Image (spheres, helix red, strand yellow):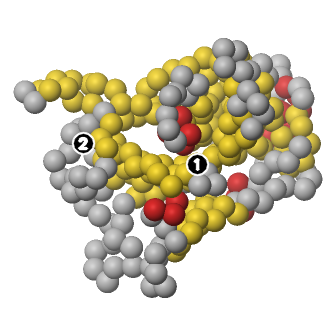
Amino acid sequence: MKVIDFAKSYMTWFGAGEMSSISRILLDGVCTLINSRGEEDVFYLIAPCRSEHTHSDGQLIVMPNYDFRGIFGSKEYKIFRNHWVSNPDYLDDPGLDTTGGRILEESGLHHTKWDDVKLNINYFHNIKELTNKQSVVDSTLNNSILVGQTELFNDKTQEKAILEYPIKTMNVIKGIPRFQVDTGPILVPNFKHDKKLKVNSLDIAHIVYNLFDRGEYISRKPVQIANNDEGPITVTDYSELVKYVGINKLYAVN
């Protein structure tokens, strides 16, 4: 089984033209969508950053600032711009769709936006699967690099998704033993989707589990927090809880 070395895996986009900016960004997670015919589509979540005036000789940080992150497949992309406030009136790109008032989402095909997009994926060579709680505790306390994989199934459509992600937070108890993964952001599937682009069937989430056959994740969604004279006030945060039955696998790098 191949396990991704997330510290050495990148998405790199190349802007249009020789003088355009090139951006290399680390990966936070991977989701492989597998349909009922066994056909696979792989999507990668890039690490978040802040909005910036790239290569400017003046102020670099965009104000008001926003959270920038994206999902990239072999042909498709999706970008999220999560702003400070609900229903911002300072957004100056009418070509983007607003979801929940605060987060702007843009999706499409690579070739419409960049000259090229490259996904450079590297894998560990010396790994072992942690098949019991004691091995998870031992590897954690030995400061081994840990990577998680979760398989999710949809019985109605016979679709499957395989999530892969670096374990950033692991909680353990030595004497019992017990473990609990708490990590993110990762990519999770929305099996109820009916989208033209497959990249739009994915959500950003954090995942928590302490068993090998079930767990929970909380997805990043718009949530209403109040009302004013102009209507509902929403923020976009981790707010939709999902409990799942699936397969959680943990790997340690030797």
The answer, for residue 181, to whether it is visible in the render is yes
Residue displayed at 89% across by 43% down: 1
Q: How many marks?
A: 2
Q: Position of residue 239 (x, y in %)?
A: 43, 26
Say which quarter of the image contains residue 153. Answer: top right
Q: Nearer the viewer, mark 1 or mark 2?
A: 1
Residue displayed at 27% across by 31% down: 234
Query: Is 188 rendered above or below residue 127?
Result: above
State the residue in front, 222 or 159.
159
- Answer with left or right where residue 181 lies relative to residue 75: right
Going by the numbered disc 1, the residue's amino acid type is Leu
Query: Is 183 rendered above or below residue 254?
Result: above
Q: Which residue is mark 2?
A: 85
Residue displayed at 56% across by 40% down: 198
Q: Which residue is outermost to the left?
A: 229
State the residue in front, 162 or 55.
162
- Answer with left or right where residue 221 lies relative to residue 189: left
The 10 Å Cα crowd at callout 1, few under 14, some 14 to 19, many 20 or more, is many
Is disc 1 placed on a helix, strand or loop?
A: strand
Q: Position of residue 24 (x, y in %)?
A: 57, 68
Residue displayed at 52% across by 27% down: 193
Q: Which residue is mark 1?
A: 45
Label 1, label 2: how many angstroms apart (C-alpha)?
24 Å
Q: Position of residue 245 (x, y in %)?
A: 70, 16
Is disc 2 placed on a helix, strand or loop?
A: loop
Say which quarter of the image contains residue 232. Answer: top left
State the residue in front, 109 or 247.
109
Q: Position of residue 14 (x, y in %)?
A: 53, 72
Going by the numbered disc 2, the residue's amino acid type is Val
- Answer with left or right where residue 73 lies relative to residue 108: right
For marks 1 and 2, the one nearer the N-term is: 1
